[in-house]
Image (cartoon, grey):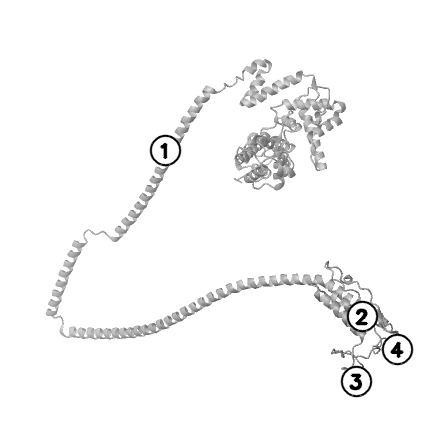
Amino acid sequence: MPLRGDSSCDAPCRLQFPALPTARSDGGDTTNVYSFVQPKININPINSAIGYLSTWPAYGAGQTSIQKHKPCAESDIRTTRLRKQNASAVSKPRYLEKLESYLRIELQSLDSAKVISQELRLQPYRDVFDYFMEDFKTYKPLLCAIKNEYEVTLAHQREEIRSLEPLKAMLVSVSERCDKKIQEIYENEGHEVKSLKIEKDNLLKLINKLKEEKISLQVQVAKLQEEMEKLYLMYRNESDARKLLIADINELKHQEDLRLAQDHKEQGEDPVTLAVALRVARNDLTRTQVLLNTMKADYGDVVPRRDFENQEKNLAASVKKIELLQKDFSQLQLEHKSLLELNQQVVQQRDSLCNEVEDLETSRTSRPVWEKCVDIFPEDSQRWSELCEGKSTDQLVDILLTELGTRVLKEKDFFPGMGIGDDVPIHLRHEGQVKNLRLSLKEVYGMIKEIWKDKCAIDQQKGKQSSLSEFMINYLQKKFGDASIEWSYSMHNTCRIQLINKQIHSVYRVLVGQMDEDLYCALFHGHEHLLTELTNADSSTIGSLTREQFRLQLRRVFPSKSSDEIQELLDTAVSQLKPGDENIHYKSLFSEDEEGNPSRFILLIQNQFSAERKKYLKELRNKLGNNPVKPEELKAAIVAVDPAIDEETLGRYLSRAFQVSKDQLEVTKPLLLKQLFQNLGAVNVRKTGATAQE
């Protein structure tokens, strides 16, 4: 077949190869590592026009070429034989030598580089193939198609490899984790197997020991069975022999009796025999008398055994009684000694207290003479005497201040306005003078009840608590219009001076921020929940309950109160019963007068509530000491005093105690103990858990 590029011609074939490029050190794309200039291959036009490929065999230079042929071709077989015969006489074509030389040089340059990839080694072969295709124009389309197919296949394989690399990494990590887990399982199983082997060895030893004991016991049982058989045989023989002997003796006695009877019948009584019998009887009597005398001489001082046992029992009882008395005597001695020591301590305390009393008498301030106040208020002398009865000095001071404040307030016609600054409560923000309405205590208390009732209803609807100061001025504006500020100032000052009416004065403290509304509600409206529960428990709806029902409702509403406090409430309720009444008329216990003064029962509930808060704050003070307190220290003290407190209540106590939000507690500075408890005194703090007695 005539083809171009026959190597049989002697015309020179020139190849122009570019200079050897250097490998990139930046690790870039290998396809751009070598930038070749397409070599120009000049082939003799005469030989090219002939159009024959070189017939030089591939194995001419000692190389072997594996070719694929169609089977059963005789011409191919003969051609192959001829080529093998003439292989030694044929030389390589120059064009092939040039290509091989270029390929060898490129590969050597790549081998000299430190880092060689398969892509770099493939590039020279691609170039040689390109040169080969460019020169043989006839086969170029086929060769290009082959090359492109290989390139596409290689690119596809690269993408496949690139997509499988993460899977390989994941497979490696999963394999490592699995190996680690398997190793851990092997280790755990190894420990378990080791422990089970030890246990198995111990059990085998125990089984062997039990087997040995069983064998020894079986041997002993067999030996005892043999001995028992021997003893049984011996006792049986003795029993048989004894029965035979008794039978023989009885037979002999019977024969002897028959013989004697026969002799007596034949001869009668023999005097000699009778004399012998009498002598024998006398000897027996003498011997018996001697024995009796000997026993009297030996046992004359011996008591009967029954009397001895009775005396022995009495002696044991007496010994026990003496031991008990001795123990009681020792206990009394110890108690007497401790009482003597206690008496000595009490005497020392008495002496020290007497000395303190003497010192106080010399340095004390004399008590005020409260009877002098009667001269100041001669027209109210009877009322003053009633108010002062059974009151302490502090209470008398409150009474006196309330009376003086009431007189001063009645004489005042106008109040000075406090301005409209932010530091002024909302209900008092006004400039200029405000008229004094001279409200009575009844009017003030009635208005407070109305305001508080509407405020509770609106707060319940909105789901949040509003400010009493703001709600009060809004309510007064709706009801009195322009005269609202006069009502606000008059109510504010009336509540301020009422020190003896705790409920009205507490409204003033709430308005100026000295008391929380929660504390006010718990102190003065906490009994309303009890009234609701008592009403629900009254199935007859007649307003009365039995004492046991009343006690159960008290325990249900006040679970944190002690039994003594519950009993005190019950006694107070019973004391208000009329003669002949068995049931408690609970509605009368919750009555109040027009000025807000509560009944004895409500006052007792308020006093118990205040005492419970004071006790709780005192326990906190004992836990904290006298140094400035940090939030975490107060938290630890509250949890120690009340372990059942929840997190929300604890956070509220801490934020109110330090006057900061919950988020700022961590950066809050320590607070003085006095200021801390002053802040806690305005908050509804009390023990949430049950008492120790409960």
* Local crowd size for mark 1, using a 10 Å CA cut-off: few (<14), some (14–19), many (≥20): few
- Residue drawn at x 83%, y 66% is 38
Looking at this view, is 325 or 479 the one in front? 479
Nearer the camera: disc 3 or disc 2: 3
Distance Cα–Cα, label 3 vs label 2: 29 Å
The answer to whether the residue labelled 1 contacts the one labelled 4, judged by CB atoms less than 8 Å apart, is no
- Residue 139's x, y, as percent? 85, 73
What mark, if any, has residue 82 been given in the picture? 3
The answer to whether the residue labelled 1 contacts the one labelled 2, judged by CB atoms less than 8 Å apart, is no
Q: Amino acid at mark 1?
A: Leu
Q: Badge 2 is on which residue?
A: 129
SS type, badge 2: helix
Q: Earlier in the sequence, mark 3 or mark 1?
A: 3
Q: Badge 1 is on which residue?
A: 340
Looking at this view, is 324 or 503 the one in front? 503
- Residue 419's x, y, as percent? 71, 23
Nearer the camera: disc 1 or disc 4: 4
* Local crowd size for mark 3, using a 10 Å CA cut-off: few (<14), some (14–19), many (≥20): few
Q: Earlier in the sequence, mark 4 or mark 3?
A: 4
